[in-house]
Amino acid sequence: MINRERLAKHIEELSQFGMQSSGGINRFSFTEEEAKANEYIEKLMEEAGLSVSFDAVGNVIGERQGTEEKAPIMIGSHIDTVPHGGKFDGALGVLAAIEVAQSLKDQGIQLKSPLKIVSFKDEEGTRFGFGLLGSRAMTGILKEEELEGRDDQGITLKEAMTQNGYDPEKIGEAKVREVAAYLELHIEQGKVLESENVPVGIVTGIAGPSWKEITVRGLSEHAGATPMPIRQDALVAASEMILNIEQIAFKYKDAVATVGKLQVKPNGVNVIPGEVTFSLDVRDLDNERCAKIVNEISEMIQEVSQKRNVESEIVELQTVSSVQADAAMQATIKEAVVSKGIKPISLVSGAGHDAMNLARICPMGMIFVRSKDGISHNPLEYSSIDDCEIATNVLFDTLVRLDQSI
Ligand code: GLV
Ligand code: MN
Ligand code: MN
């Protein structure tokens, strides 16, 4: 059994790093807020008896020995946030994993397998438009040339790494050799568990995101002196594209497409917008259908550009394949859920997670925690401490069961 009060205290304490006066949290990769939060995580890991290290991209890793020489079981999540994010997305998973380690220590429980608890670097991709950084590096798929993404100040991910003492040429060193199984506890960020009236759920698969950046170039001219028929207004063209993106996504059941970021240049009241950059996030559990939707959107963007006499460029930011959770891991989590007298509910994750990358190298399982009103990526994001406690106990129980079976 885990310690509910301690977990609640840690959720509250971690939320203070990057807390804004508005109540939202800004904790982005390679920033001072994140560095301080990492120091806090390091301290909690040490208290829990873990030996702590930072790998070549800044993943924080807490390790505990097993009684046997085996590949480790890994439990992870992330502590970075979206802009104006909440207290639970990622943070709960890291703190729950540390709470499990602390409880094992308190109760003198030895596991056969070594345990690795990981707080992954930059899951959200907020600052550089390129997420899952830590889990990409750890699974050996991150390439140095992918570190060229820039933040709003024009600093590249590569430069930010260097400024923080990391060598972009050494990212290969973050690759792990062997992992026996990967577990992640995360808030659901949807309404399925709430509607089923259960505190936790078992994830069956994760829909991978496809991210693009679209730049539309028209002509900046005088808003008063340029007649309507001859304008090359980049914002009006982008607006038509964005409405069409919504229509295209509506045609495919369960697919979602979002434009969440928009930059208008020169951004003046009396200037026709000459350049607009917007983001695109498309998700579908079916990888082929996701590619088809992206293709349809790309063709539409070219058509609108021709019609409105503007130029458009589409740049790939990231495409992550959808994955299935391991069947045996799902079964183990289900046993743990049922052992607590809870109805086992299985569900798909619409949100992306580091677990998508870990699933490439080992069996992966995820435990979801009920989200109030399904809200997340918002300061209102909330999971009750009752639910967090139950889920962390399910995590504890799943780990012990896994340790017996592998
Ligand atoms: C992470 O939260 C994502 O799904 O974008
Ligand atoms: Mn998130
Ligand atoms: Mn998350």
Image: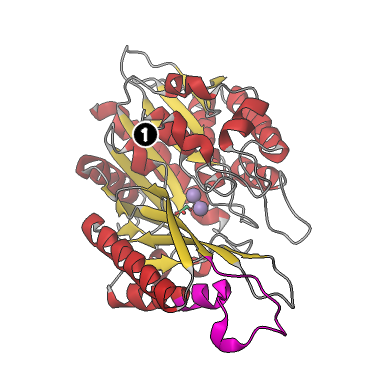
In the rendered image, the vertical position of residue 308 relative to residue 287, given as above or below: below
- Front residue of 142/17: it is 142
Q: Residue at x 73, y 51 (%)?
A: 19
Q: How many numbered discs sit on the rendered protein?
A: 1
In the rendered image, the vertical position of residue 98 relative to residue 168, given as above or below: below
User: What colour scheme governs how the chains and residues are painted in the rendered image of this protein?
Assistant: secondary structure
The quarter holding residue 280 reads bottom left
Q: Residue at x 71, y 40 (%)?
A: 33
Q: Residue at x 30, y 16 (%)?
A: 70
Q: Is residue 212 visible?
A: yes
Q: Name the amino acid type tagged 1.
A: Leu
Q: Is residue 196 visible?
A: no
- Find numbered disc 1 in the image and state the secondary structure of the residue it sits on: helix
Residue 225 forms part of the magenta stretch: yes
Farthest residue to the bottom: give it. Answer: 228
- Front residue of 159/361: it is 159
The quarter holding residue 377 reads bottom right
Residue 177, position in %: x, y?
34, 19
Question: Residue under circle 1?
Answer: 399
- Front residue of 277/177: it is 277
Badge 1 density bin: few <14, some 14–19, many ≥20, Cα 10 Å:
many
In the rendered image, the vertical position of residue 129 relative to residue 347, given as above or below: above
Relative horizontal placement of residue 294, taking residue 328 as reference (left or right): right
Residue 189, position in %: x, y?
47, 60
Q: Which residues are magenta?
A: 217-240
Residue 196 forms part of the magenta stretch: no
- Front residue of 121/344: it is 121
